[in-house]
Image (cartoon, rainbow, N blue to C red):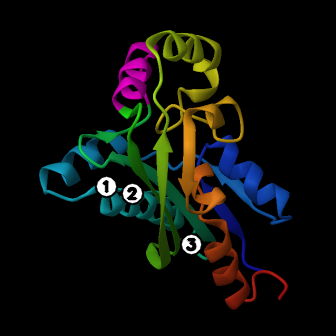
Amino acid sequence: MTRIILASTSSSRKQILENIGLKFDVMAPMVDEDAIKESLQAEGLGPRNIADALAEAKAVKLSVKHPGALVIGADQMLALDEGPLFDKPGSPEIARAQLTLMAGKSHRLFSAVVVAQSGEPLWRHVGTVRMHVRPLSPAFIDSYVARNWDSIRHCVGCYQIEAEGAQLFTRIEGDHFDILGLPLLPLLAYLRERKEMPS
């Protein structure tokens, strides 16, 4: 079997792959995500393509350092139907502002995964989920952020759907694993196709 590396420090992505029994190493990709996003937005790229490009940058960078290994890179971007792109909140104030904008509206969550080897992207997939947020009172937003800040600070959209974040929604259309940040089923299909997993 080929060595597999997850180019991510996300505990959620690591847990997903551990849960299905995949043998892999975890490494931080060490890419300047903010600079890449800024550059791509300046070029006019939308959230889907930005998520894809970030996932590729992470996978390719580590695959150059570890030739021969299959490196999995992943990223997410969130876009309101009308409004700005959202990223991980940098502070509780930003989290409250994002949730206020999201309240009572729907948004799309783009979850990208790219597999690279020896500096070349081999395979990619971008999943899209539509999330419908219920109306949220300022008091609920304040208490929600105060209770959950440590766990949502690294989450695009300020929620962990597997925890209290489920309370934010009236309806979700799409794949559960895409929400968690890793389009797992297409990734597993690719790994089985390559004979990296039992079929």
Tag of residue 51: 2
- Badge 1: few (under 14), some or many (20 or more) residues near its Cα, within 10 Å? many
Spatial CA span between label 1 and label 3:
30 Å
Which is more N-terminal, label 3 or label 2?
2
Residue occupying the point 56% across, 33% down: 168
Residue identified by numbered label 1: 47
| Quadrant hosting residue 90 | top left
Q: Nearer the viewer, mark 1 or mark 3?
A: 1
Q: Nearer the viewer, residue 56 or 128?
A: 128
Give the tally of numbered discs: 3
In terms of secondary structure, where does tag 3 sit?
loop
Q: Nearer the viewer, mark 2 or mark 3?
A: 2
Disc 1 versus disc 2: distance between alpha carbons? 6 Å
Q: Give the residue drawn at x 72%, y 71%.
A: 3
What percent of the width, then of the height, locates residue 174? 56, 62
Relative to the observer, which residue lies in front, 38 or 28?
38
Amino acid type assigned to the residue bearing label 3 in the image? Pro
Q: Position of residue 148 (x, y in %)?
A: 63, 20
Amino acid type assigned to the residue bearing label 2 in the image: Ala
x and y, in percent, of residue 96 in the image? 42, 18
Q: Residue at x 19, y 50 (%)?
A: 41
Split into 4 quadrants, where in the image is the C terminus? bottom right
Q: Is residue 31 left or right of residue 152?
A: left
* Marked residue nearer the N-terminal end (1 or 3): 1
**Residue type marked 1:** Pro
Q: Are marks 1 and 2 in contact (CB under 8 Å)?
A: yes
Magenta stretch: includes residue 36: no
**Magenta segment boundaries in residue numbering:** 89-101
Vertical comparison of 118 with 98: above or below: below
